[in-house]
Image (cartoon, rainbow, N blue to C red):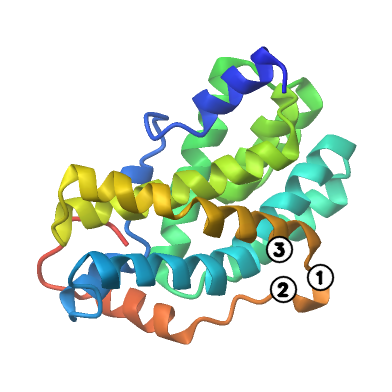
Amino acid sequence: MQAAALLNLLQFASPALPIGAYSYSQGLEAALENGAVRDAGSARAWIVRHLHDVVAQWEAPITWRLMQAWSRRDWNAVAEWSEKFIASRDSSEFRAETIQMGYSLTKLVAELDIADADMLAQLQGKSEVGLPTAFSCAVAALGIPHQEALLAMLFAWAENQVLVCVKSVPLGQVAGQRMLLSLRAELEAAARYAQTVSDDDMCNWAPGLSLLSMQHEVQYSRLYRS
């Protein structure tokens, strides 16, 4: 991996990217509220289950397909997978989350002038942009290798989940880093699966997570927006 591509990846997968990822827990805060997550062991189990049963089954494979579509300039495929992802958000919080971050990253891509006119027109021409679509556009525009970008996307997701646990379980900082380190094999496995799963085998069926998201919408005390 060339130094320029690595630096681009570090910037666009960073939690410091101003798109608001830190403000979402993706249902984890509701799991903390009802006691499903209560300590380091249950927190790790939650993250691993969410990774393999939800992210690796749908969000990661769609991101993989979108990166390839953007690189091929296959605008029909970009539109198809973008629409499918937004349609799969089955609670108001999950839908608002991806559209807010997608909007913020689209604006950042334009302001940083990293995409050519055709790519930018495709990105800005959509009425709603999900985060995987905007992230994949940035990856293609900056020439970041897809495998590394997918791993970085998964790591950023896991890091945010761990940070929610550090703040809310609560876990100590060292315990959080130990947990993140222990997830590396799981993240690698999820990335491999996302690259090889067929279109017909992809699935966003996660009714328990959907119910938690809906419960979070009316949760009395909240730190996170999802």
Is 140 or 225 nearer to us in this picture? 140
Contact? badges 2 and 1 (CB < 8 Å):
yes
27 vs 187, nearest the viewer: 187
Q: Secondary structure at mark 1?
A: helix
Q: Is residue 221 left or right of residue 94?
A: left
Identify the amino acid type marked 3.
Answer: Tyr
Residue 142 on image: x %, y %:
70, 23
At a point 52% along the width and 26% down the height, the residue shown is 10
Q: In terms of image quadrants, where is residue 34?
A: bottom left
Residue 92 or residue 49, whichever sits in front: 49
Q: Which mark is residue 202?
A: 2
State the separation of the CA atoms marked 1 and 3. 12 Å
**Mark 1 = which residue?**
199
Q: Which mark is residue 193?
A: 3
Gap in Å between the C-alphas at discs 2 and 3? 10 Å
Amino acid type indicated by mark 2: Met
Q: Tell us which disc is closer to us: 1 or 3.
A: 3
Looking at the rendered structure, the kind of residue marked 1 is Asp
Residue 186 left/right relative to 18: right
Q: Is residue 19 above or below residue 168?
A: above
Question: Can you see residue 59?
Answer: yes
Figure quadrant of the N terminus: top right
What residue is rendered at 74% in x and 49% in y? 66
Q: Position of residue 97 (x, y in %)?
A: 42, 55
Q: Mark 2, residues whose alpha carbon is within 10 Å: few (<14), some, or many (≥20)?
A: some
Q: Quadrant of residue 210?
A: bottom left
Q: Secondary structure at mark 2?
A: loop
Task: Measuring from the top left, give residue 218's x and y in whole percent.
Answer: 21, 75
Q: Residue at x 11, y 72 (%)?
A: 220
